[in-house]
Each structure stands twice: as C-alpha cells, then as structure tokens.
Image: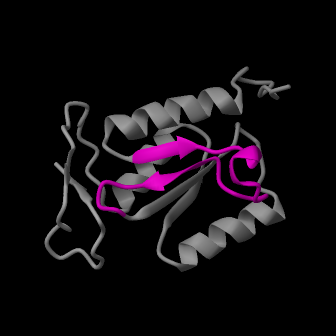
Amino acid sequence: MEIKDKTTNVTEKKIQRDIISFLRKHSFSVDILTISSYGRKGMADIVGCAPDGRFIAIEVKRPGGKLTVMQENWLAEKQHHGGVVFVAYNVDDVKSVLTSSGYSLEDNTNTNWVITKEAPEGAPFSPAFSIAK
C-alpha cells in the first residue's frame, strides 16, 4: 500500500511519475526502479543519464520523508564517482538541482535520436554504436 502525505495527500509514486515526465521532456534518459528490478536495497528511485551522459540518481520522498542509512550510503557512493545525485520532494527540487548543476532545461520533446556506428567526437569510450541528435 502506498503511503500518502497527510498534509498534501500526494504519494511518492505520483511524485516519481511527475519527475520522470519532466526529465524525459528535457532529454534525460531515466527510469523508475524498484527493488525487484535489480535487487539492491538503497538504490535511488529514479536512475539514468543526463543529456551529456552523466549518471543521474534521484531518491524521491514525499514531504517529510527521510532517507534510510542504506539510501544515504548508495547516494554518497554515486556522488563520490561524479554522478548527479539528490533527494527530491517535488519537480521544483529537480529543476533547482539540475539548474544549479549547469543543465539547461529547455523543452526537448521533439528531439530525434539517431543511432550511429561511431562514437561522438571527444567521447572517452568507443562503443559499438552511439546515439546522437
């Protein structure tokens, strides 16, 4: 059973859906994870890549929600390795953190992605294929 915030009647699942919608609108490749997805306790609710390829992880909490020790440790590990990781209580939190991290949040809903066989110029890796705008 999903717990609702007593003051706003908002569930974490609703907040997650709103954040996912916002991020995808701005060309972030993200998914909602559940423990059954990968089986690692403490993983953030939303993980994926920013448009520049940087790892992003968001732990979604309803207002007043608190992180577990496992969640704190998981987020700290990813942040230590350069990921953009944070806790969000709403879409405005996401906008604030991403803007302060240097991301432009223009509407990119009409982005057409093309799969190519060459890595983008300056890429630190050589994948079998790459995805470019």
| Residue 25: % across, % down | 33, 34
Q: Report if residue 48 lies within the magenta region.
A: yes
Taking 111 as reference, is 68 above or below it?
below
Q: Is residue 68 left or right of residue 106?
A: right
Which residue is more in the foreground, 39 or 95? 39
Q: Residue at x 82, y 29 (%)?
A: 3
**Among the 4 quarters of the image, the one containing residue 11:** top right
Total labels: the figure holds 0
| Residue 70: % across, % down | 80, 64
Q: Residue at x 77, y 28 (%)?
A: 5
Q: Residue at x 23, y 40 (%)?
A: 106
Which residue is more in the foreground, 63 or 27? 27
Taking 70 as reference, is 7 above or below it?
above
Q: Residue furthest right?
A: 1
Q: Is residue 57 left or right of residue 132?
A: right
Q: Residue at x 75, y 59 (%)?
A: 40
Q: Is residue 90 left or right of residue 2?
A: left
Which residue is more in the foreground, 131 or 34? 131
Taking 49 as reference, is 90 above or below it?
above
Q: How is the image coloured?
A: one colour
Q: Residue furthest top?
A: 9
Residue range of the region highlighted in magenta in the rendering: 29-53
Q: Report if residue 10 lies within the magenta region.
A: no
**Among the 4 quarters of the image, the one containing residue 103:** bottom left
Which residue is more in the foreground, 77 or 88? 77
Image quadrant in which the N terminus is located: top right
| Residue 16: % across, % down | 59, 35
Q: Is residue 56 left or right of residue 126?
A: right
